[in-house]
Amino acid sequence: MNYHFLHELLDSAAAYEASQQETNQEKNLQGYIDWLTRKNQDWEDPTWQGKELGRSAESVICTLLIHMGRYAKSYSKAAIEGSDFSTQDEFIFLINLKAHGSMTKMELIKLNKQEKPGGIQTINRLIKMGWINQVASQEDKRAKLIHLTLKGEQALDAQMDKIRTATKIVSGNLTNIEKNQLIHLLTKLDLFHEPIYEMHPSSDHLLDIGIEKISTK
């Protein structure tokens, strides 16, 4: 039995009942179907500030993504308040090392979608803190791999409850179904932008490359 689907269905039904609390309409299967239909229509034709003046959907998406990045950063900052962490990149690096194992500096920086100078600066601080170390690769003695140390794992574990709280807050009041929808859409966007980002094009060519990829999708 697909229990994940049942959980999503129950979440959706609970959202329907909550939306009808201030109405006198009877809550039944047909009412739920009608509610889902109206909800889907809202997704198809949303409203936003400036729409009647010609503001595009693309402009709204870009603005909202910028806003979400700033909100997430503020919660991350609160999650490390009073700890030895200085930035959210530091604990993200440690999380990636714990999840994926040892890797080179550039692999770690690339995984975090960070520019090389900033990434190296973060890695150097983590080494100074004793939270990660470098060792020669068994396969290639010229290469050095970054390892998460016991001290780094302990520092991360001490902060994980607050970090999990911050990530939960970022998801806000979305239902499980809406979270899955958002993951699907953001993953689609990530797969579009990642190849362009990894090309490291110069600023004067970046927009042309992006537009060309949109036109050939």
Image (cartoon, rainbow, N blue to C red):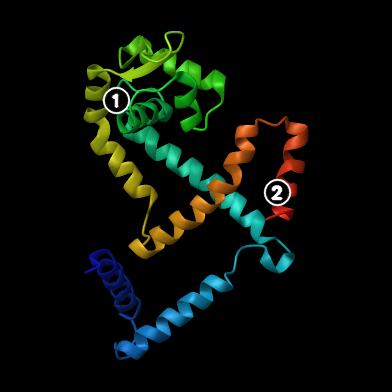
Q: Residue at x 30, y 17 (%)?
A: 131
Percent of width and height locating residue 41: 53, 77
Q: Is residue 69 left or right of residue 205?
A: left
| Mark 2 / mark 1, whichever is N-terminal | 1
Asked whether, in this view, residue 64 is left or right of residue 163, the answer is: right
- The residue located at (40%, 63%) in the rendering is 178
Under mark 2, the amino acid is Lys
Foreground pick, 143 / 42: 143
Q: Residue furthest front?
A: 139
Q: Position of residue 162 (x, y in %)?
A: 27, 37
Using the numbered discs, state the Cα–Cα distance from disc 2 to disc 1 in whole angstroms: 45 Å
Which class describes the residues within 10 Å of circle 1: few (<14), some (14-19), or many (20+)?
few
Q: Quadrant of the N terminus?
A: bottom left
Q: Is residue 145 left or right of residue 4?
A: right
Quarter location, residue 99:
top left
The residue wearing badge 2 is 213
Residue depicted at x 50% and y 41% = 70
Q: Is residue 72 above or below residue 62?
A: above
Question: What is the number of the mark on residue 82?
Answer: 1
SS class of the residue under badge 1?
Answer: loop
Residue 179 bears which disc, if any? none
Q: Position of residue 199 (x, y in %)?
A: 65, 33
Residue found at x 27% / y 27% = 156
Q: Closer to the camera: disc 2 or disc 1?
A: 2
Above or below 53: residue 114: above
Specify the amino acid type for callout 1. Answer: Gly
Q: Is residue 104 left or right of residue 56?
A: left
Q: Secondary structure at mark 2?
A: helix
How busy is the neighbourhood of tag 2: few (under 14 within 10 Å), some, or many (20 plus)? few
Which quadrant would the C terminus be assigned to in this image?
Answer: bottom right
